[in-house]
Structure formats: structure tokens, C-alpha cells
């Protein structure tokens, strides 16, 4: 008897997992592909082509008024569908242009503003925000940090599988060491309590769980900033303690910004921008800052030089010469 044909979205999920894409990418791609199919009244993508893809992307921009980055994300999902799942080599795939994303200067806080905001934070959220500003790591790199990758003796953080699948090392601020050690002591007690109830295992990337069966319960592999509650893994269904939720950290930042009376639209990622800018202001080499941030190209880091001089490009206004 012939096995039932796998549903298209399940094929998409399997293909994404084979390529080791993140769960966020999987959820995003599946959602865009589902919306594409529903937009064209549930027609199968194999029956459609360039005209339907362009019509969908145009609808997003004109009717949905989505940002260029959102439109490009939808385009990436559809190109993945046709190239990797349907295995279509149609020439029109390369002819679909990406929307031009406007170049925006990042929001940067002054050192005084950072101190004021951080003074209005507390608990693990405050510790994470201080770690983001003190090391320049991304919000998800902070949330996914494992206990074993914090090196107190050398004063280092090892950032694994960062953007682009790269590992890098950044500094661990001495000012955070006592608070971080106290925090980890509480996390370890929570982990030991989980073990007593039959839990205590953590998600391991790729095939490490099969290669090292005991590692998922090992203290070193636990998240440094775990969730307050157990949850079901969306892929395996296993009940585990995942890392803290990024939305909670973003809410804590918004509240701190309001309490501090700061009018800039600051987010946790703004602390990363501020980290880079303040290092450049202190005279550190831009290549060093590039490595700490994990940027592939120095041109990405160059955007932070916009605040190093007074005014536009360091030009003194003629009014100030009068």
C-alpha cells in the first residue's frame, strides 16, 4: 500500500530542520507560505509562478503597507519553498527583486542615559540588560547563553552559533561578576529541583543529545537565563525549561525607559548600538569593535561612527563662528 503523501507545510518543516535553521526561521517561513497559499485561494504553489509571487509581494507592500524588511522576509520564504522544497529551477526565481530597505541610523543612548535606564531595572531582566550593554551581545545571544560558556577566571563570554553560525569571544565586565555568580547559584538550585521532579534536561542543538546522552541534564549545558516555568518543545513535544522569553526582556526595557523619562525609542538592541558607539568614542579600534560585535564586514560597524563628531560630519555651523 502506498504511503500517504506528506503535506506541503510538513515538507517545508522537514527541509528547514534538515538544514538546521532556527525554530524562529521555521515558524516565520511556514507562516508566510501559508499566507501565500491562502492569498491565492489555496492553490498549490507548484501550479503557480512569478506572477502569483509578485502579486502577493505587491499586495503586502500596497495593501498591507508592510516594511521593506518584512516584504523581503516573505520573499525569502517563498524562494526557499520553490528552490528547496518544490525544487523548481524556473528562471523567474532570480528575477524577483528585493524591496529596497531604507538606511536608518541606529538609536544610540548617551552613557548617562544608559546609567539612568539601568538604574530603573532589577532582577534577572536588569542583569541581562546590563550584560547586553556591557558585552555588546544580541538579545538572543544573551538569552541562549549556556552556563559553560561563561568564563569567570578569564573574564570572557563565549558566544556560540551567533548570527551567520559563527562563534566569537567577548569580554565579561568585572562589575557584573558578583551579581552573575549569585544569579547562577539560584539557577543551579532551580535546576537541581527540576532533576528531583524528573525534569532538568535542556534543548541541545543538532545531534548532540544523541552523541552525549547525559549532556542535556548536565549543569554546564543549562541556560544561564532560564524560563520561570517548564514548557513543551514545539518540535519534539518534550517538556523542558527553555530560556527566558525575549518579550519579557523587551517589556522590562520599555518600562525602564519610561521610568527614566527617556524620550528616545530605546530597546534592548539599542544597548548593543550604545556599546559599540561608546567603545569607538573611547578610542578603540573599529576592527576590534567589529570582532566583539560579530559583524561579518567592517562596513556594518562603520555606521556607529555617525555620532563620533559634533553635528553633521563634524562640521562647525557658521552660526557658531559669529
Image (cartoon, rainbow, N blue to C red):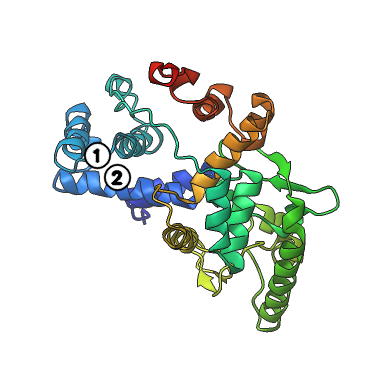
- Which SS class for mark 2? helix
In the rendered view, tell whether residue 16 sits above or below residue 321: below
Quadrant including the C terminus: top left
Residue 119, percent from left and from top? 57, 61
Question: Is 194 on the left or on the right of 24, as rendered?
Answer: right
Residue 219 in which image quadrant: bottom right
Q: How many marks?
A: 2
- Asked if the residues shown at circle 2 and circle 1 are in contact, with their CB atoms under 8 angstroms apart, the answer is yes
- Report which residue position mark 2 lands on: 33
Q: Which sits in the foreground, 179 or 218?
A: 179
Q: Which sits in the foreground, 93 or 282?
A: 282
Residue 185 in which image quadrant: bottom right
Camera-nearest label, 2 or 1: 2
Residue 89 in which image quadrant: top left
- Report which residue position mark 1 lands on: 45
Residue farthest front in this picture: 322
Amino acid at each position: 500500500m502506498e504511503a500517504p503523501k506528506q503535506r506541503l507545510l510538513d515538507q517545508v518543516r522537514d527541509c528547514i530542520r534538515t538544514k538546521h535553521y532556527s525554530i524562529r526561521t521555521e515558524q516565520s517561513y511556514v507562516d508566510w507560505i501559508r499566507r501565500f497559499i491562502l492569498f491565492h485561494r489555496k492553490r498549490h504553489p507548484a501550479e503557480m509562478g512569478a506572477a502569483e509571487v509578485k502579486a502577493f509581494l505587491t499586495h503586502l507592500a500596497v495593501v498591507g503597507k508592510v516594511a521593506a524588511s518584512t516584504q523581503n522576509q516573505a520573499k525569502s520564504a517563498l524562494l526557499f519553498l520553490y528552490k528547496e522544497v518544490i525544487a523548481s529551477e524556473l528562471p523567474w526565481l532570480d528575477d524577483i527583486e528585493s524591496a529596497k530597505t531604507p538606511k536608518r541610523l541606529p538609536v544610540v543612548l548617551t552613557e548617562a542615559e544608559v546609567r539612568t535606564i539601568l538604574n530603573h531595572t532589577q532582577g534577572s531582566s536588569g542583569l541581562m540588560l546590563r550584560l547586553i550593554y556591557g558585552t555588546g551581545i544580541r538579545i538572543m545571544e544573551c538569552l541562549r547563553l549556556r552556563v559553560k560558556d561563561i568564563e569567570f577566571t578569564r573574564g570572557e563570554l563565549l558566544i556560540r552559533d551567533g548570527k551567520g553560525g559563527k562563534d566569537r569571544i567577548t569580554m565579561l565586565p568585572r562589575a557584573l561578576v558578583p551579581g552573575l555568580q549569585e544569579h547562577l547559584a539560584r539557577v543551579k538550585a532551580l535546576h537541581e529541583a527540576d532533576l528531583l521532579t524528573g525534569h532538568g534536561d535542556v534543548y541541545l542543538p543538532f545531534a548532540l543529545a544523541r552523541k552525549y546522552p547525559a549532556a542535556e541534564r548536565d549543569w554546564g549545558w543549562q541556560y544561564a537565563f532560564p524560563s520561570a516555568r517548564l514548557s513543551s518543545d514545539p518540535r519534539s513535544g518534550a517538556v523542558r525549561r527553555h530560556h527566558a522569553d525575549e518579550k519579557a526582556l523587551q517589556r522590562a526595557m520599555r518600562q525602564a525607559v519610561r521610568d527614566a523619562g527617556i524620550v528616545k525609542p530605546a530597546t534592548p538592541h539599542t544597548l548593543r548600538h550604545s556599546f559599540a558607539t561608546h567603545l569607538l568614542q573611547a578610542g578603540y579600534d573599529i576592527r576590534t569593535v567589529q570582532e566583539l560585535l560579530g559583524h561579518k564586514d567592517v562596513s556594518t560597524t562603520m555606521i556607529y561612527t555617525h555620532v563620533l563628531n559634533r553635528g553633521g560630519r563634524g562640521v562647525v555651523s557658521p552660526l557658531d563662528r559669529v
